[in-house]
Image: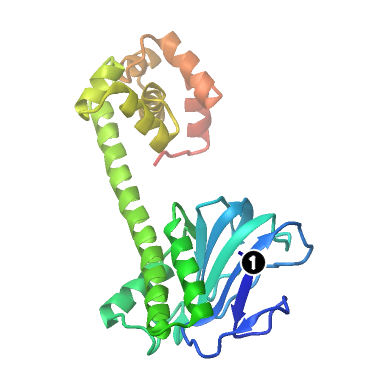
Amino acid sequence: MSYFIYSKAPHRLVNIKVIEDFPSIWEFGHERYSNIKPSSLDLHLNNGIEICFVKKGRYDWQVENKEYVVYPGEGFVTCPWEYHGNSLGIVELGEIYWLIINPDIFTKEDGCHLANWSSFSQDQEATISKTLRENHNHLLNNCVRLEKYFLQLNHELVNREFGFDVKIRSLIENILLEVVRIIQNRKLEANKNNAWINGLKLLFTTDLSKKWTIEEMSSHFSMGSTSFNDKVKRLTGYTPQSFLIDLKLDQSKKLLLETNRFLTDIALDCGFYSSQHFSSTFLKRVGMTPSAFRKRTRNKSYFIE
């Protein structure tokens, strides 16, 4: 399939199709990039909500001051007030689809009104507006279903069979729904993961002196050892035992700063085998001995959250 561009505005490519008769779309396109062109895509704003899907390639993308790497099967979404593009002004090798949805009004202050082409209720429109305005992660993970909608949208624009205008409005709404659900589900998953990690922290910190095995840890969550280990590494970046050591060190820092207790007492209360084990672990992870940490942080009026 060759590339296509539909646009209401003058475009950097001359071979485009005009879509004045579709108020819901500002621009819709699909391109394959077989070579890198300098100054082909500087940071810019759009007149609407842009949704992009990467079919092939790897794209370094910037939205406002945040850097992203977008891989095949992923995409991104931006609002009209968000500068985005490639910081070097180029489009890298690959294949992408993009759609710029044309709302009647969409500002950071006043929210979004999609206009008469939308069949969303007022409450649904308010949810879409709130979700997009409050979204700070512009990357859309695992959004392969967008490609299906984009292909169907192109089919309707090209063939214009009976009811194509109704179908196009429906596809635009489905694309918006898919994006909003990805953002909402990501937030729900993050909250769920945070709650799970907080439960793990509570289990460990209730008795830091307890000598845990991986089997004992995993059994508290009704999980197998391998699954538990993988989940902790995915959510924290550490193995369970390494995560536990970090919690012990966090508690030891508080005791070093807030009390005058002996290092041996702190070491045993925080689950270390001895003051030597405590000191060597502390030095390795923190970069200084416990005594040096106590002296340095107290002199600097350092407080731990």
State the residue in front, 195 or 132: 132
Q: Work out which quarter of the rendered image holds the N terminus and state it.
A: bottom right
**220 vs 170, nearest the viewer:** 170
Q: Position of residue 135 (x, y in %)?
A: 43, 63
Residue 94: tell me if it is visible.
Answer: yes
**x and y, in percent, of residue 7 in the image:** 60, 81
> Which quadrant is the C terminus positioned in?
top left
Q: Is residue 178 above or below residue 254?
A: below
Count the marks: 1
What colour scheme does the image use?
A: rainbow
Q: Tell me if 5 is positioned left or right of 102 in this view.
A: right
Report crowding for label 1: few under 14, some 14 to 19, many 20 or more residues within 10 A (C-alpha).
few
For badge 1, the amino acid type reads Ser
Determine the secondary structure under disc 1. Answer: loop
Residue linked to disc 1: 2
Foreground residue, 224 or 269?
224
Percent from the top left, x then y, of residue 274?
Answer: 38, 9
Which residue corresponds to the image point at 38% horizontal and 58% vertical from the top-left? 182
Quarter of the rendering containing residue 31: bottom right
In percent of the image, x 64 and y 66: which residue is there?
A: 2
